[in-house]
Amino acid sequence: MIIEFFVDDSFEKIEYMKEMIWAFYPLSHIVQEDQNADVKIKITKNANNAVFQLQETETGRTVLKKESFREDRYYLKRKLYEALETFSGQKMAWGIATGIRPVHLADRILKENGGQIDPARKQ
């Protein structure tokens, strides 16, 4: 799957956004511009809003989310997650945590609960 991903220059770092896209579309190839892209994702900023636009090329189905803008990477990641969740119909088990982070969370939970995933099952 090819995903065309455009982000306004006003956003500083975008790697975390790419990680989120890969979480929903793990075998995708993310490019800046491609006429044959299966999905187009565009994130822009105007005045006080961040605009997330996702479009499926073949069907034309579009999800458009306008959110108040904050210079907070986790806020933007959460809003991108919500847009991808709506668009793909998928939910990620770890929410916005991507990459190695879910493993660190699981490890911390296991250590805090004596090796048990469910603390109610402690013996």
Image: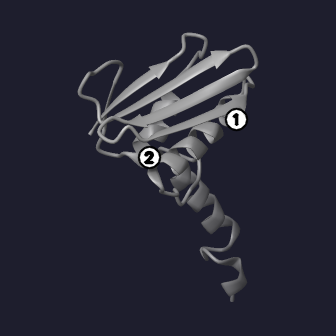
Instruction: Give coordinates of residue 27: x percent, y percent.
Output: 29, 44
Residue that extends furthest to the left in the rendered view of this protein: 36
Q: CA distance from mark 1 to mark 2?
A: 17 Å
Residue for badge 1: 75
Q: What sort of colour scheme is used for the picture?
A: one colour
**Can you see residue 122?**
no
Residue that extends furthest to the top in the rendered view of this protein: 9
Horizontal side of 95 relative to 18 (left or right) equals right
Instruction: Give coordinates of residue 85: x percent, y percent.
Output: 53, 50
Instruction: Give coordinates of residue 30: x percent, y percent.
Output: 34, 29
Horizontal side of 13 relative to 112 (left or right) equals left
Residue drawn where x is 67% and y is 15% of the image: 46
Hey, what amino acid is under mark 2? Ala
Residue for badge 2: 23
Horizontal side of 68 relative to 110 (left or right) equals right
Residue drawn where x is 45% and y is 32% of the image: 18
